[in-house]
């Protein structure tokens, strides 16, 4: 298994290589990658494959062909990192960096290898680029980048270079889970840098989430900070109090903070005043039992269905992530509104120990 420095050295050895013939998108890396025969240095097939991704794979393949997926598609390679729990929002040297430029509507269309990190700037080794152009530049170059970055894929390097936590951006990171995550290896989740886990309690038929007891026992075992959440189906004050009572009874031995999940379209149709009463009934019942509660919702709910009184008096956990959600934390989407203390920044995160997508959260203050 190669080290980070092995990969960087191999990539640096290619700097200056250019396409031949010009604009062919095909010379060394695609011919080696696809196994096309060549004659006098020119591919005998007419296919033209952008060789930014082929070049990245070629570098890793000089050491271990299985270290990254064999593909010439930036999108395919990025998806592979994501589905294998190796997608990150902050760089490390040796990462594969993914870009998106305004050339089409694909979620990524260019890749490189992170050579160095200098503050907010990364230094990269890129194939099929130039000093001044992000189009078909036709060379292997060292570039400096600070924008158009989608995220980072992190290969599993040699064990003599242990990986840092994938969550190394200064935030306190967590996940919220339910039966849909299935069996979870919480030891791996802990090792990945997750510090808190928020558990679904009562489901629509007023029974307990089937994985609740298992998840709670594991979270206590591995010393995660625990909160709970209850999706609101209530359309009356009495129904809200019933939902609260069931939640209170479930968590009475491990009292923690409870989030009331406000996103039901049928509840939204009741209007802002009715929603305020339902929320106050739930939170009031929790308060009488000695349990603090707050409100989970998205941007649309916060702006259109949540009353000023609720915004002034209670804590909020806000769901807000990009339309093309690939598990990355987007600082430009951070909700900086009154009493917002937690942010769900992705619904398609990947975390070691969990085989499905999972919601990713951070504490804001």
Image (cartoon, rainbow, N blue to C red):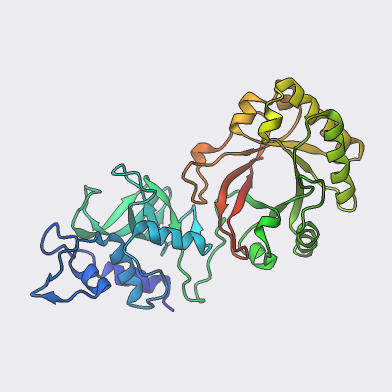
Image coordinates for residue 175, horizontal then vertical, percent: 65, 52
Image coordinates for residue 113, horizontal then vertical, percent: 36, 61
247 lies above or below 285: below
256 lies above or below 49: above
Image coordinates for residue 230, horizontal then vertical, percent: 76, 43
In the rendered structure, the answer to whether residue 75 lies left or right of residue 313 reads left
In the rendered structure, the answer to whether residue 349 lies left or right of residue 77 reads right
- Identify the residue at horizontal 28%, vertical 66% (top origin): 55
In the rendered structure, the answer to whether residue 130 lies left or right of residue 330 reads left
Q: Quadrant of the C terminus?
A: top right
Front in this rendered view, residue 283 or 148: 283
Front in this rendered view, residue 264 or 332: 264
298 lies above or below 36: above
Front in this rendered view, residue 329 or 260: 260
- Identify the residue at horizontal 51%, vertical 76% (top origin): 159
How many marks overall?
0
């Amino acid at each position: 298994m190669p080290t980070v420095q092995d990969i960087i050295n191999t990539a640096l050895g290619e700097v200056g290589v250019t396409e031949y013939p010009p604009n062919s998108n095909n010379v060394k890396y695609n011919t080696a990658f696809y196994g096309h025969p060549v004659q006098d240095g020119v591919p005998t097939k007419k296919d033209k494959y952008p060789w930014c991704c082929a070049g990245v794979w070629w570098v890793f393949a000089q050491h271990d062909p299985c270290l990254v997926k064999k593909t010439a598609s930036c999108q395919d390679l990025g998806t592979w990192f994501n589905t294998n729990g190796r997608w990150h929002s902050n760089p490390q040297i040796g990462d594969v960096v993914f870009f998106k430029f305004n050339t089409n509507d694909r979620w990524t269309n260019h890749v490189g290898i992170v050579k160095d990190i200098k503050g907010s700037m990364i230094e990269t080794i890129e194939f099929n680029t130039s000093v001044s152009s992000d189009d078909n530049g036709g060379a292997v170059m060292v570039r400096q980048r600070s924008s158009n970055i989608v995220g980072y894929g992190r290969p599993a390097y040699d064990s003599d270079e242990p990986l840092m936590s994938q969550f190394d951006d200064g935030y306190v990171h967590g996940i919220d889970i339910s039966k849909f995550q299935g069996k979870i290896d919480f030891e791996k989740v802990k090792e990945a840098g997750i510090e808190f886990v928020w558990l679904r309690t009562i489901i629509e038929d007023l029974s307990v989430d089937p994985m609740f007891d298992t998840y709670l026992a594991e979270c206590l075992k591995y010393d995660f900070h625990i909160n709970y959440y209850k999706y609101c189906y209530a359309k009356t004050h009495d129904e809200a109090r019933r939902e609260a009572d069931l939640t209170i009874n479930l968590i009475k031995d491990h009292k923690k903070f409870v989030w009331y999940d406000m996103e039901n379209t049928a509840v939204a149709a009741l209007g802002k005043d009715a929603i305020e009463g339902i929320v106050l009934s739930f939170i009031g019942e929790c308060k009488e039992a000695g349990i603090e509660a707050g409100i989970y919702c998205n941007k649309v709910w916060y702006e259109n269905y949540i009353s000023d009184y609720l915004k002034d008096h209670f804590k909020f956990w806000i769901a807000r992530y990009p339309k093309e959600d690939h598990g990355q934390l987007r600082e430009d989407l951070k909700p900086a509104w009154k009493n917002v203390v937690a942010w769900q920044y992705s619904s398609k995160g990947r975390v070691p120990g969990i085989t499905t997508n999972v919601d990713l959260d951070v504490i804001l203050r």
